[in-house]
Image: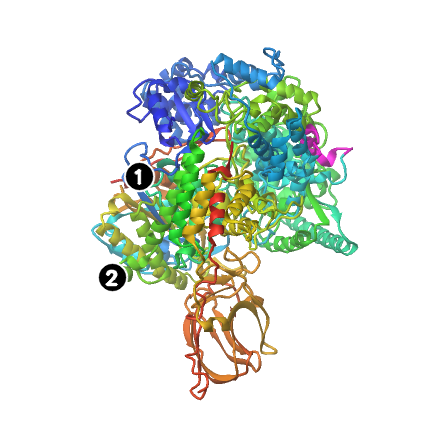
Amino acid sequence: MANPLKSTAHGSPTWRFRCLIVIFLSGTVVSLPAVESTEAETFFETEIRPVLVTRCVACHGPDRQEGGTRLDSRAGVSASTVSGVFARTIRGQSTAPAACILEPRLADHFDRWIALGLPWPEAASVASAADKAEMAKRHWAFQPLQIPPIPGDHTNPVDAFVLEKLGAAGLSPSPEADRRTLIRRLSYTLTGLPPQIEEVNRFVNDTAPDAYARLVDRLLDSPHYGEHWARHWLDVARYSDTKGYVYAREEKNWPHAWVYRDWVVAALNEDLPYDRFLLLQLAADQIDDARPGDEAAMGLLTIGRRFLGVKHEIIDDRIDVVTRGMLGLTVGCARCHDHKYDPIPAADYYSLHGIFDSSIEKLVPLETGDETFRKAHEERVRKLGETMAKFRDGAEGRVRERLADYLKAQTELEKYPADGFDQVFQKTDLLPAVVHAWRDYLREAGERNDPVFTPWHAYAALPKEGFAGAAQNIDWSTRPAHPQIAAAFAIPPTSFDEVITRYAELLSKDDADETIRAVVHGPGSPCKVPEGPLVNVETFSDTESINELWKLENEISRALINAPETVRAALILADRAIPAQPRIFLRGNPLNLGEAVPRQFLGILAGENRKPFANGSGRLELAKTIVDPGNPLTARVIVNRVWAHHFGKGLVDTPSDFGTRAEPPSHPGLLDWLTSKFIEEGWSVKSLHRRILLSSTFRQSSFGPEEAETRSRAFSSDPGNRLLWRMTPHRLGYEEFRDSMMAASGDLDRTIGGKAVEAFATPFAKRRALYARVDRQFVPGALRVFDFANPDLHIPQRNETTVPQQALFFLNHPLVLDRARAVSGVTDVESKAPERVRALFRHALQREPTDPEITESLALIDEIGELTLPQNPPTADDWKYGYGAMDEKSQRVTGFTPLTFFDGNAWQGGSQWPDAKLGWVQLTATGGHPGNDRAHAAVRRWTAPRAMTVTLRSTLVHEPAAGDGIRAFVVSSRVGLLSSVSAHAKTSEVNVDAIAVESGETIDFLVDIGEGLNSDQFLWGISLTNTPSDRENPTPGWNAKSDFPVNRVTPLSAWEQLAQTILCSNEFLFVD
Amino acid sequence: MLTRRSLLQRSALGFGSLALGGILDGEGLLASENPLLSRGGHFPGKAKRVIHFFLNGGPSHVDTFDPKPALAKYAGKPLATTLTTERKTGAAFPSPFQFQRYGQSGIEVSELFAKTAQHIDDIAVIRSMYAQVPNHEPSLMLMNCGDSVQARPSFGAWTLYGLGSENQNLPGFIAMCPGGMPIKDSENWQSAFLPGAFQGTYIDSKHEELSRLIENIDHPQITAVDQRRQLDLLARWNARHRVDRIDERLDARIHSYELAFRMQHEASDAFDLSKEPAHLRELYGDTVHGRQTLMARRLLERGVRYVQLWHGAGQPWDNHNDIETNHRKLAGELDGPIAALLSDLKQRGLFEDTLVLWGGEFGRTPTVELSAAGKPQMGRDHNHYGFTVWMAGGGIKGGTVHGSTDEFGFKAQENPVSVHDLHATMLHLLGMDHKRLTYRYAGRDFRLTDVHGKVIREILS
C-alpha cells in the first residue's frame, strides 16, 4: 500500500518537481489537478476556503451581494479587507447581522490570512451554488444516458467497446482461458461456490458450441446464485443481525434481519426487476400490488445501527444507505453544510430527512406460526399497547401540570441538552425533549402568526431592562391576538415571568376557547408524546417508565427471535399521521434550526420542475423518482456494481460515489450501452449478467497475451488492467473460502434461507457463511482480518489486504483444522497412496495432481510418519470434565453433561471462550471457571474404579476481589454432599477423611457462581489417596493436575496435514 | 516481473502521467505489500510508540491530579452550577484523599497515585480536558475514535495506517483488558472504514497461557517440525503456481506465511514473563495489572506501535458510590505498575521515544451523587465538562501543568483542551500532521480530528 502520509506533495523533500497530488486509497486512486502547494495555500484551502463557502458566499456570492459585498473571489475579499470592515465584522464589531460573526478561532485564521496577503491559488475559486450547478451540468454521471453506436463490427457489443479502447492504447486482449478455469471462474462469480469435479469434467468434455452459454444459464438458475449476490447487496445494506450497542434495557437482536436477508436471496433468484427490488425496499408498505411478505424488503431501512435511539443518527444512516446505495451520491456530506463538491445543498439533505422523520418503525408479523404462538403474540402486543396508552396519558398529564415550568424553560434553553444525551430522569423532572417540543411549537406558531401566541412573541422580543415600560407601548393593530388572550393581557405585564404565568393559567383552563385548548389537547400539541414506537418516545418520559415499557417490547422481540422459522416478522417504516415538517439543522446541530424545507427529491436529479412530495411522508414518491428510467444514476450505479463484482473493479472506480469527484468511467460508452439495455430489458439483473459473462472479455485468460512482448507491454502500460487486456484473478473472500472448504469435503449444507447460525461455535456450522449471525458489536477477529464488510457502514467495495494474521488463521484456526480432517476423510484409506493424493486434489482443487505433486505429497506423508499419541497416566481415565447443577434440596449433582471441546489446555463449550451456548464454564488442570448461571456449574467428576476408602486433600483459591465469589461443593453420587465452602478472595482447605466409595460411585467437585457472574475464576488443587488400609491396591492415588490429559487433542495425521497444506495454497484461494 | 518498488522507481520519471490515466492500482498495492510495514511520518516524531492506560469508567480528577481545596471549604453546601450530568448530584464533596506536592515542579498529586507521583517531573498534567456528553458510550468513542456517534477508526488504527508497525511478527496495535471487554467492546479499537489489518488485537490479559492471549497463535494438533514441513511444501507449490501468473497478491500471501511462522515464535517469546528477571517482576507486581503492564513493556520494546491497557471489563472506575473505598482499591492496583513502567522505560532508554497516556473517557463531578430519593451516595457522577489526563515520555515537557478547571473542578476553564486537541497533539508527537493524515471514504477525506484539533504546544519539550 502506498504510504498514506505521502499522499500529498508537501512535506516530502523528494517531491521537488511540480506533480500531481495522488491519494492512494484502498480500492481507489484519486488524482487531483496539479497545484503548487505552499504552506500558505494549504492554509487557505484548509482554514479559509471552507469558511467562505459555508459561512459567507450564500449572502455574498453570485446569487446575493448583501451590503454590496462579494466574497467569492480574491478581488472581492480584498476590497472589504482593505477598509478593515471585514475584520471588524467577523468579530462582531460592526452593524452587520450576527450571522457574520465568526468563532474567535476562525476569526484568528482570517487575521492571519489577511496578514499573509490573502494567498489565493489562481485556479481556485470558491465553488458557489451556481458554480456547482454549472459543474453538475457538465458532470458525466448527471447526463442522460448517451447510447453510443457500437464500435467496429464485432458481434459482441461488450467486446466491441473493450477492443476499441485496447486498440487505441495499442494493446491486444488475451486468449480465452482454458475450460477448467472458465467453469471455476463462472461458478465463483455467480454462486460463490466451486464447481464439483464431475461438473468440471462434464464441461471440459462438452464440445457443443453452446456449452458455455448453457453453463451460464445453469448457474444463474442455481438457488446459490441468489445467496452469493445477496451477500454483495448486504454489504451495501450494512447488514447485521444485531442493533449494535444498546443500553441494557433494550433487546440487542433484531427480530427481522434474517427475514430481510432471505427476501433479498429470493428476489435475486427470481430475477425481480431491479427497479421493483428498490421500490419494495423503500416503500413496500405503500405499494398496492405488493405480494404478501414483501414488507420484509423494508429491512434495508430498519436493520441499521440503533445509535442508542438517537433519531437524527438513525435517519442519517438511512439517508446514507439509500443515497450511496441506490444513487451513488454522498448526500450524507450535506448534513452539516452544503456538499463541498457536489450540487447537493444542505436543504436537500433535510428534504430527505423530513421523509424519514415522517416515517416510523412498525413491527409486522408476516407468518405467525401455530395458533398458540399467534395468540400469545397478540396478547403481548395488546399488553404493550395498553401500557403504552397509560404511559402516554401519564406523561402528557405531567406536562400539562407543569405548563408554567415548561414555558419558563423557553427562556433558558441552554440548560436543556440535545436529544441523545442520556440523563436519568425522575417523574418530577422537566424533560429536555418536551422543552424542545415547546420550543418548536412556539417557533412555528410565531411564523404563522398564530393569534394565540402573538402576545407571547411580542413580549419575548422585549428587553429585560425596561420591560414594563415597553410592554405598555406595543402596537397590537398589526398583530391581533386571540380575544381571550388579548383579554388576559388587557393589563400589560410587568415582566416576562408574568407573561409565562398568565399563559400557563390560560392554557390550563378547561373552559377556554377550543383553539386555546387545542394547544395542550389537540393533535400536534407539544404536550403530546409523539406518535411512534418506543424508540421514538424514550426521551418523553422518566427512565423508570421507559424501562418498564422496554421489558414488554423485549418480550415481543424475544418471542419472535426464539420462535421456529415458521414465524417471520418484518420491521417496516410506516408514515406518521402528521408528516414532520423538515427544517435545516445549521451545522448539523438539531438545536440550531434553520429555514423550513419541503419534503422533496434532490434538486440535481429532479431538475427545475421539482415539486414537493404530496403524499404522506413522500417516501413512495421518493422511491419512484429513484427508479424513474430518466434518473441518470440508479441504473448506471447497479450496472457498475455488477460489473465490478465480475471483474474485480468497476468501470467507475468508486461504486458508491458518482459525484463530481468520481473519475469518469474507463469505458463510458460501454457503461451507457449496458445501462440502456438493462433498462430496456425490464431491469433484469440476470440478463445483465448474461451480457457480461458471454463476452470474450470475461472469458480472457488472466495470464495475459501469449506473446511475451505484448504481455510485457500491456503490463507496463496498464498494470492495473483498467483497459481489460486480461482477466484480473479473483481472490476468494471470507465467505467464498469458508464455503469452499466445506464443499471440498462434500459437507456443505446447501439449505437455502433460515435463521442465522453461529459461525464459530463447535461443531462448526456447515451452512453457507451467508447464514452466519452478524453481530455488529462482536465481529469475530477472523472476519475482520479477512476484510469482511463492516456492518456499521455501507461498504461499496471490500478492502483486500494480506496480513500474517490471515496466514495464522489458515495454519492454526480450529475451523481449518476441522476442514483438513474432513477433506482428508474423503479419501479411501484402503486405496493406494498416489490415489489418495489424487482424491485430495480432485476434491479441493477440482483437478488431477501432476506427477511431481504426487511425489512431493508422498514425501510429506513419509516425513511426518505415524501419529504418536501422547501418553496419559492410567489414572487419567477416572476423571470426567463437564457441567451440571447443585441441587441443594437433594444434595446431589444433577444434569451432569461432559464438555466436548478440549483446546489442549482446557475443557470448555467450544473453540471460542466464552462459548455462545455454554458461556464461561471451563475446567483446566489446576482450576477453571463456573458457567454463567447455577445450572452451568463447572463439574470435575472422579469415578471410583473399585470399592475402597479414599482421603481428600484439596486447596481452593478464589483470588479476585471483584464480584461476590464462588461456591464449591464436594458431592458423592451415593451419599450426597461431603463438603462445601463459599469462597471470595480467599484460600480454603477442603478436606474429607476416609470416604468409603463403591465401584462406579462418583465424587463431583462442583463450582458455581455466587449471587452473580463476576470474576469467578478459581484454582482447585485436588488429590485423592487410598487410605493405608487398602493394601491390595497400593496405587499412589489421584491428582487432578497430573491426571489432567496432557493432550486430549488427536494430532493431525500426515494425510490431514497434507489436506491442510492444499487448503492453504494460493491455488485454493485464487481463481484465475 | 515488475514489482511495486520498481514501478514506483520508474514513476519518479513518469509518475504524473501514470496517475493521470488513473491506472495505478491502489487496491493491488494495498494487497501486494504488507500494509503494516513500518514507514516514516510527515516529519520526524519524538515518540515512536504509545502506551495508553485507559481507566475506563472515568477516574475522578479531583481525587487524583486536580486538587480542589475549595471543596473542603464548601463541603456539604450546594454549588451554584447549571451544568447537567447523567444523574442528580448534591453538595460539594471534598476529596477524601490527601494531596501532596512532588518533585522539583511541586505538582500536587493525591495519595492514590503516590508512586506514580515520584515521576511527576516527567509528566505533563492536562487539567482542562473536556468531552461532549456525560455518558460512557459516546465518550469512549470520542476518546478512542474521535467521534461520539459514527463508526470511525480508533486512534491506534489511524496510527498503524500512518506509520505501520516496527515488528511484523506481532500485531501492531494491541488492546489488553483483563477478564473481558470494556463497554462498547471491540468498537473501542475498531478500524471502521480503514482496512481490517489496522484494527486493534484484543488480548484478555487475565490469562497467562499464550494460546489464550492471541488468537490462532498455535495449535496443539501439530508439532513445529511438522508445520515447517507443511510450509516448505506449501512454499514450493505456491512458487510453482506463481510462475507465469501476473499478480503480486500471490507474492504477498506467500510472504505472509513466513511472517506468520515467525510470529508464532516471536509472540510466545513476547508474552513469556518468565524471561524477565525476578526483581522486575517484583517491581511490577505479580498481579493482573503488574503482569499486563510488564507484558506491554515487552511488546513496546519489540516494536509494537500502540498498546492500550484497560483496567478491566465493563467500567471499573465508574464509582457512583463510595468513591473512597473504590477509587482507593482501583488506584492501588494501577499505581505500582505505572510507576514501575516509568522507571523501567527510563532504565532501558525507551522513555524518550515512548508516549505514555493516562486517563479515562471523562472525569467525575465535584459534587456528591444523590440517589433517586435524594440521599448522598458518597460517590461522584460522570463529568465531561472538565477532567484530567496526563502524558509522559516521547516529546512531552515533564513537570508541566496545562490548563485548569474552575474553582471546584466542574468545568475546564483556562486553556480548555478538547479530545481532538489531545489527538492532534499525540499524532504530532508521533510525527504526523493531523490535518494531513486522511483517508477517502464515502466521498470525503476523513481525519481522526474531523474538522477540529489543535496541537497543544505548551506541553511539548
Left or right: A76 as drawn, with respect to A232:
left
Q: Residue flagged by tag 1: what amino acid is it? A: Leu
Q: How packed is label 2: few (under 14 Cα within 10 Å), some, or many (20 or more)?
A: few
Q: Nearer the viewer, residue A569 or A480?
A: A569
Find the magenta span and give its range: A270-289
Q: What chain is tagged by disc 1?
A: B
Q: Is residue A627 above or below residue A482?
A: above
Q: Position of residue B242 (x, y in %)?
A: 43, 33
Q: How packed is label 1: few (under 14 Cα within 10 Å), some, or many (20 or more)?
A: many
Would you identify the image quadrant in which residue B416 lies?
top left
Q: Position of residue B223 (x, y in %)?
A: 40, 54
Does the magenta-highlighted stretch encompass residue B119? no
Q: What chain is tagged by disc 2?
A: B
Q: Nearer the viewer, residue A452 or B358?
A: B358
Does the magenta-highlighted stretch encompass residue A273? yes
> Residue B279 — which label?
2
State the predominant SS element of the stretch in magenta: helix
Q: Going from the N terminus, do you reach mark 1 or mark 2 first? A: 2
Residue on which disc 1 sits: B429
Residue furthest to the left: B104
Q: Is residue B339 above or below residue B255?
A: below
Per the image, label 1 sits on a secondary structure element best described as: helix
Per the image, label 2 sits on a secondary structure element best described as: helix
